[in-house]
Image (tube, rainbow, N blue to C red):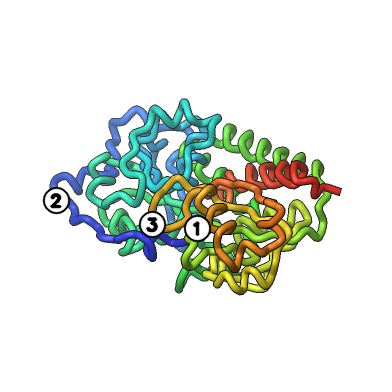
Amino acid sequence: MPHPRRILAGAVALAGSVALLAGCGSSDDSSPHSTAEGFPVSLANCGEQVTVDAPPQRIVSLNQGTTEALLSLGLADRMAGTATWTDPVLPSLAEENDKVKRISNDWPSFESVLAEDPDLVTASFSSTFDKGGTAPRSRFTELGVPTYLAPSDCEGKDDTGGDGSRSTDFTLDLVYKEITQLGELTGTSDRAAEVVADLKKRVATAADSVHAQGTTVLYWFSDSESPYMAGCCGAPGVISRELGLKNVFDDTRDEWPQISWEEVASRNPQVLVIGNLTRDIQSGESAQKKIDFLESNPVTREMDAVKNKRYIIATGAEMNPSLRTAYGVQNVADGLRELGLSK
C-alpha cells in the first residue's frame, strides 16, 4: 500500500502520564494466563525479538492486514482495538470485527493506543511503526509492550525510501508465516494451520479455474493525479504469477511507483485491475471515481481496456500483502472469466 506518511499528516501524540505508561503491557505473575502451556513464546521478527509471557488478552492491531489475520484466528474477544482501514472488513469476519473497538480509521496516536493497555501491538507496514506513523517499535519496547510487524514488509524488501522496493518477489509464504507466528504468540497454532490450509486451497482453486496466460494487466491502487501503479513484485505480483498474467510495469521492482498517464497509455494493458478504496485521502480513491477519470481523460480514454470497459474491481486490501491477497487471486480470476479472457 502506498505509505500514508506521504498522504497523511503524521503527527505522533505525546505519551500520557508516567504512571499510565508504566502499566502498559506489564505481566502479573498471579494472572491465570501466566502459566499457560507453551509460554513464554519468543520469536525473531523483522530484526527484533518478540516475547510474550502469556497469551495476550489486549491486542491492538494498527493495520487492516494484521487485524484480519487476528480475527481469522478467532481472537476478537482478545483484541482491544484496531486502526488504519482501506476497505470494509472481509465479509466472513464482519460479525467478529463488530466486537472490536475501532480506535481510528487511519493511524492512531501513540497515546490512544496506550490508553487501551495493550499487551501486544501488531502492524502490517513498517511505516506504521515509524516516527511519522503511530510510533517506532522502540517506544513500545521501552514500556514493556511487545510488537509484531508482518514479515511481508521487511523480508526481501528495501523500505529506505518512498514505498519501498522488493529485492525478492513477495510470495504468500510470508503471509502464511505471519499467520503461523501470530498463532504461536497467541496460543492459537492449530487454528493458524487451518487458516493457512484454507488460503492455499483458495489460491489453487482460483488458479486452476482460469487460463489467461500472457494477458497484459495494470494494477491501479490510488490517486488520479500522480497514480500509484503496482510494480512487479508486491501482492499484485502474486496475482499475476498465479494466473499467468503479465503486469505491464513488471520492469520495476518499486512496490508502488508513481507513473504518468502518458506512460500508462503507452503500455496499453488489456485489463485494468482497479482499487476500490473506501478511505478519502487522495483523488480517485473509489473505483467509480477512477473509472470516471479514465473515461474522461483525453490520454486514458483512448486505451483499449478503457474503450472496451475491461475493468476488474479489487479492494485495496487485496492488493496489499496480507491474507486478502489470496482473495485477490480469486477475485481477478472471476473477473477474467466474466470478461471472456479465460482461454
Question: Is residue 294 visible to the viewer in this orientation of the structure?
Answer: yes
Mark 1 residue type: Ser
Name the mark nearer the viewer: 3 or 2: 3
Residue drawn at the location 25% of the way across and 58% of the way down: 12
Tell me the element at label 1. Answer: strand
Residues under labels 3 and 2: Cα distance? 23 Å
Residue type of the residue flagged with mark 3: Thr
The residue mark sitting in front, 3 or 1, is 1
Q: Do the residues labelled 3 and 2 touch (CB within 8 Å)?
A: no
Q: Which mark is residue 222?
A: 1
Residue situated furthest right in the rendering: 343
Kindly state the secondary structure of the residue where label 2 is placed: helix
Reading the image, the residue beneath label 3 is 128
Residue at image mark 2? 18
- Circles 1 and 2: CB distance less than 8 Å? no
- For badge 2, the amino acid type reads Val
Q: Distance between the residues labelled 1 and 2?
A: 41 Å
248 vs 77: above or below: below
Instruction: Name the front one of labels 1 and 2.
Output: 1
Q: Pick whichever, 141 or 306, lies toward us.
A: 306
Q: Of callouts 1 and 2, which one flags the residue occurring earlier in the amino acid sequence?
A: 2
Of the numbered discs 3 and 1, the one sitting upstream in the chain is 3
